[in-house]
Each structure stands twice: as structure tokens, then as C-alpha cells.
Amino acid sequence: MFMSHWDFFSKDQLESGETLIHPMAVVSKGATLGKGVKIGPFAVVGEKVKLDDGVQVGCGAVLGGDLSIGKDTVIFPYATVGSLPQDLKYKGEDSRIIIGERNRIREYVNISLGTSDGGMLTRIGDDNLLMCYTHVAHDCNMGSSCIVANGVQFAGHVTIGNRVVLGGLAAVHQFCTIGDLAMIAGGAMVTQDVFPFSMVQGDRATLRGLNVVGIRRSQYKKVSDIKKMYSLVFKQELALDEAVLQIKEQVEDGEEKSIVLAFLEQSIRAGRGLVR
């Protein structure tokens, strides 16, 4: 456990599985703490915060708002989770953040509460790594098993799929959607939706092909179907709605097809267009 490096608690305490709150932490009486939660010095845990079993909160971290954090998630020092949205339209409405299990939220990460324009909810799935200085703005919706490198910035209302990788200092414009298993290069400025299984790079981000290595390492086995769908969308000079029809007709049913169709249909509704 990361706290053992700072000697906040004895080795016996850390291995006991009991809930431990450092005497210099501030934990509101209304906070709900599961079994084995550990909270370091100078951390602040607000009235509506719910920490499931095994959650660790590092020194100086601030947890506020209506916030739920799943089992075995680690909040590293000085992260701020549940801060007020950086949105001038926000007027103090009750809003939430739901964070899943086994996430690693590193130093100085900031995650904002939702707003009325986004369903009052910011959501993060399971098994994500958010490296230092990442900003997850209001009403973002992140899937699971994503790797977000240092300094990545998500504007409000961004949707991030599963197993997405973002390089350091990348930024994503508000209301954009990043498809499953996409890879965003370091420093990329993303202003449109990113096709699942693809790679993008640059300012403004442009398409660099399929994330072939990521696909091979994943559970997705229908590589030929992914390539065919990619070709229909980007190489056949079809309108998006026509590409959707061709995918439905030409590609065998499966998880890969479902992912791409769901992404394209959502992208068409949103109207931001695709990174090309």
C-alpha cells in the first residue's frame, strides 16, 4: 500500500485491514467509510463522501461533494476530487461524482462535479490510471481500464470509452467522444470525435491509422472486421449515415461491430464530426 512509504501508520496497522484515520485528517461526521479505509494527514473528506472498502486517501487530498468511490481505489496526495465545476453556469445545484473500483488517481488530479446540463453527474469506471495533473471536468463519462498520462485535460461533457490511452499533455474539447481502444498521442489537441480502435496525433489531431498493437493485445479478435469498418468510414468517401448502413449489411455481428455502430450513431446525433 502506498501509504507505507510515508510511515503514517505502523506496518501492523496497515496489514490489519482496519479503517485508519490519521489524527490530522479532517473527516466529516456524515462521511461513509467502508472497511479498511485509510486516510492520511491533512486530507479532507466531506459530508456526502462515500468511500467503499479498501479506499486509500493520501495526505492533503480533498474529497467533497456528493462523491462515491469504489473499492480499493487509491487517491494520491493533493488530488482534489469533487471540486466545484469550472463552469459559470453552475449555481450550486446538487450534483455527483461516481468513481468505480481499483482506480489510481495520482497527485494533483482534479475531478469536478457534474452540472445541470450534463445530468448532474461525472462518472469514472474501474481500473483506470489518471496520472499527475490530469483534469476531468464536469459531466465527463470515462469507461474502464484507461491510461491517462500526465497533464491531460478533459473539457466538460467529454465521453471516454474503455481501454483508451492518452499521452501526456493531450487535451480534449468539450462534448467530444473518444471511442474504445483509441490511442491519443502526447500533446494532441482533439476537437472532434475519435473513432474506436484508431490512433490520432497532432494539433489539431488527425487520424494516423488503426491502433493495431492495442487491438492485438486486447480481447478483440475480429481484426479483419475492424479494418473493414475503418475502411468504410474513412476510405470509401461515404457519408457517415451511409457508412453505418454498409457496416450493418457487410460486417458480421459481434462486439467489435456493436462498439463501432454505437459510436457512429452517437457521433451522428452529436454532430461534431470525426477526426480524419
Image (tube, rainbow, N blue to C red):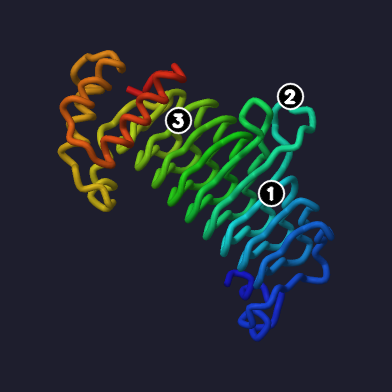
Q: Where residue 37 sits: x, y (%)?
A: 67, 68
Query: What separation in Å lies between label 3 and label 1 (alpha carbons)?
Result: 24 Å
**Res. 211 image quadrant:** top left
Task: Single out the mark in the foreground, 2 or 1.
Answer: 1
Q: Which residue is mark 1?
A: 67
Identify the disc placed on residue 88: 2
Quick check: 126 above or below 173? below
Mark 2 or 1 closer to N-term?
1
Total marks drawn?
A: 3
In-image side of 24 versus 123 (left or right): right
Q: Residues within 10 Å of mark 1 (few under 14, many from 20)?
A: many
Q: Quadrant of the C terminus?
A: top left
**Res. 123 image quadrant:** top right
As helix, strand or loop, the secondary structure at mark 2 comes to loop
**Residue, x 57% and y 62% (percent of image)?**
71
Q: Which residue is mark 3?
A: 177
Mark 3 or 2 closer to N-term?
2
Say what amino acid the circle numbered 3 marks. Answer: Thr
Say what amino acid the circle numbered 1 marks. Answer: Leu
Q: Where residue 13 sits: x, y (%)?
A: 68, 82
Q: Residues within 10 Å of mark 3 (few under 14, many from 20)?
A: many
Q: Quadrant of the N terminus?
A: bottom right
**Res. 164 image quadrant:** top left
